[in-house]
Image (cartoon, grey):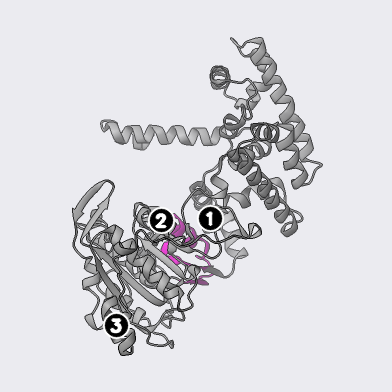
Amino acid sequence: DTYINQNYNDFYKRNVGEVYALYEKKLKGNNALDFDDLIIKTVELFKTNPTILEYYQNKFRYIFVDEYQDTNKIQYEFIRLLSGKRKNLCVVGDDDQSIYKFRGADITNILNFEKDFPNTKIIKLEQNYRSTQNILDVANHVIKNNYERKDKKLWTANEEGSQVVVENVVDSDEEAYFVANKMEELMTEGYKPSDFAILYRTNAQSRSFEEVFMRRNISYKLVGGLRFYDRREIKDIIAYLKLIQNPVDDVSLKRIINVPKRGIGNVTMERIEEYANKTGESLYSAILSVDEIPKLSKRATDNLKKFADMINNFFAAKEVMDLKEFIEKIIYDTGYIKELEEEGSIESRTRLDNIREFISVAVDFEVTNPDGTLEDFLANISLLSDVDKTADVDDSVTLLTVHSAKGLEFPVVFMVGMEEGLFPISRALNNESELEEERRLCYVAITRAERLLYITYAKIRTIYGNTNYTLPSRFIDEIPENLVATSAEIEKEMPTTDKEQLIKVRDFSGKAQKSKSKPKVSVDSGKVKVGIKV
């Protein structure tokens, strides 16, 4: 209310305040908290109830925080309150890898740590066990151009390694062919498809690589596609489980009340919602009083009573059945399986397979959590989406954004699209703080590489339907010339006989190989998995 009153004359801000107030009211009405509330309400409780705060300060004598550079303001406040009594706080983080400002991460949490927590002891972990020294030197030279950072310099006991390759190509098509050609060349030297990763700034850049890989029969996985828990049938089953666990969850009820179809349409739902809003109760509670809801047809009333009887039956079954059996009861008693089986399409068969896999998830949960409840299972599922993100083809090239690559490593990395306006992104060019975040993102990308790093930039770039001439990224200019080379320069340095030199002609533009196709090979059906390009 305070925010709305303060901004009443600002139409946009007033509407933001009113929408947020309505959102909070809906959460309270559904007896629910969103993820941010979990910590916000905890901090509010600590600040308003010193007894509870002291209890938890005594309970947690030592506090350890990992990835501290990614914390936000409310997480910082939570840590400060919890560690306030004993001051036994240890945090691990790298300010040079703070790349989630768009999610609320605040780099000043780690930069100001010594000021906020006096008598701090700092231990620099500068030895790197992943990359070659050449790759680290490139990373060090790029990141040292940031001002908002703590001074450090990575080093390694690993070999010096090859020079980083910086390749200028004509356009995105030539860039994709260069990458594919280089991968095929490296595979003849013993590398596997899973050793390669292509890192780009935006998801829109993946298209040209996908097309070339499909032509070349190079298997790949695209991180960030439709994940398991985002699939429609899985979300439907989870909605049933959520409603049974929390009957006032109106969102889940509206998702599944007519899934599979049971004759409860939009008009019926509107009348139920009108009645629930007037009486101040949940939708499910209103359905239990269906005879009191005006303007409902006899057919709609009968269908709602059948739905309520089914859900009430599930309430009772939940108390006596184990999780696997309970989920099986839901998918069969609701008619969900029957509808998919009767449809008989390829899509419906895939959806059936996904539901079966979900039952496997329940089995695994029961094995690892023998005393776990339905509530525990749902809480576990809600945290699985990021873990599931990279679950795909085993031996395949990985395509992903730099943000998605955080924490991962690959023997060979291709950083593509290194052009001004793309990396760094255009919106950061006139904002120093945003530009430093882009440089940290570049640093993260470079340090994903273990042995070989290739950086490409195009003279012409077509993206979002627009074609423009481009300039090399300023981050390339920040790398000393002695640390980089082109692929042609490296090939010249490779020892070859006169005979080999005569026959060794390689077109990295890929234009001459566009019509080339690999012979089809037989595939063992037992090794085919969902997502494999065949």
Q: Earlier in the sequence, mark 2 or mark 1?
A: 2
Q: CA distance from mark 2 to mark 1?
A: 14 Å
Is residue 12 visible in this depiction of the protein?
yes
Instruction: Specify the label residue 480 is tagged with.
Output: none
Q: Earlier in the sequence, mark 3 or mark 1?
A: 3
Amino acid at pointer 2: Glu
The residue identified by callout 2 is: 210
In the rendered image, residue 513, in percent from the top left (x then y), is placed at 34, 63
Amino acid at pointer 1: Val
For residue 77: magenta?
yes
Considering only vertical position in the picture, is 362 above or below 6? below
Q: CA distance from mark 3 to mark 1?
A: 37 Å
Q: Earlier in the sequence, mark 2 or mark 3?
A: 2
Q: Is residue 179 left or right of residue 223?
A: left
Q: Viewer-proximal residue, 379 or 230?
A: 230
Q: Secondary structure at mark 2?
A: helix
Q: Quadrant of the N terminus?
A: top left
**Range of magenta residues:** 65-92
Quarter of the view holding residue 253: top right
Instruction: Specify the label residue 534 is tagged with.
Output: 1
The residue identified by callout 3 is: 502
Quarter of the view holding residue 461: bottom left
Amino acid at pointer 3: Leu
The structure residue drawn at horizontal position 38% and vertical position 63%, both measured from the top left corner, is 199
Q: Single out the residue that lies furthest toward the right.
A: 320
**Camera-side mark, 3 or 1:** 3
